[in-house]
Amino acid sequence: MRWELCSKTHARLARIVTALGFRHVDPARIFCVRGYGSTSEAWARIWGLPALWQQVLGIGPAYVVEIIEPEFGRLPESEQDRILIHELLHIPRTFSGAIRPHRTPTFQITRRSVERYYQRYLAAVAGAAGRVSQPDDRADRPERPAEVPAGSSVSAAARRRSPAAAHRRAGRSRRRMGALR
């Protein structure tokens, strides 16, 4: 196995972090390497620096995103971006050096969730390009409606209609039905 630092991948990663608004991610504490000679079938992987190592070495949290060559390089750029987004989703909001698993009770890293983030990334990049090339047209836009306070009935109704709430309600119904049998 051989590794080399990759500034090109780091620049792409930093661009994705900025475009998606991942404020919890510090690109300066993420290192990107290209790995050669791996027998893994993965295209990329992320490594975190555990808290014990941070404390012993007297340094802060850090991550290494390893790109597996030549597999990663053969992919189209759009798929490479999706893979980088997938690896970024493994970084928890605490940016502690820990690795977030694919499935938790509150979050899942799936093809669908990565695709949602990828579409947000494309929209952000397209929006940034549009802002650079076009004059400021904010005066022509309608004003945004005011935020709804958290305790209002509208907010509660929106929470009741959310897909996550429907999923929780469905789970409760199945459990009740199981208890009746």
Image: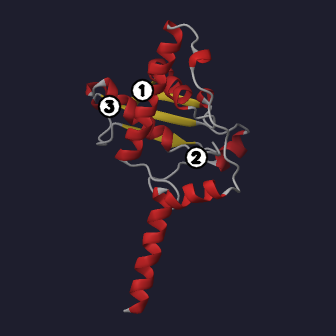
Location of residue 174 (image quadrant): bottom left
Measured along the vertical axis of the image, is residue 65 above or below residue 92?
Answer: above
Specify the amino acid type for callout 3.
Glu
* Residue at the spot 61% in from the left edge and 59% down from the top edge: 156
Location of residue 36 (image quadrant): top left
| Residue depth check, mark 1 versus mark 3: number of the one nearer the observer | 1
Towards the viewer: 56 or 125:
125
* Residue at the spot 43% in from the left edge and 77% down from the top edge: 173
Q: Earlier in the sequence, mark 2 or mark 3?
A: 3
* Mark 2 lies on residue: 92
* Residue at the spot 45% in from the left edge and 18% down from the top edge: 8
Towards the viewer: 89 or 154:
154
* Mark 3 lies on residue: 79
Location of residue 95 (image quadrant): top right
Residue 122 marker: 1
Q: Earlier in the sequence, mark 2 or mark 1?
A: 2
- SS of the residue at dot 3? helix
Q: How many marks?
A: 3
Towards the viewer: 60 or 101:
101
In the rendered image, which quarter contains the N terminus?
top left
Q: Earlier in the sequence, mark 1 or mark 3?
A: 3
Specify the amino acid type for callout 2.
Pro
Mark 2 touching mark 1, by CB under 8 A?
no
Residue 32 in sight from this viewpoint: yes
**Percent x, y of residue 85:** 44, 35
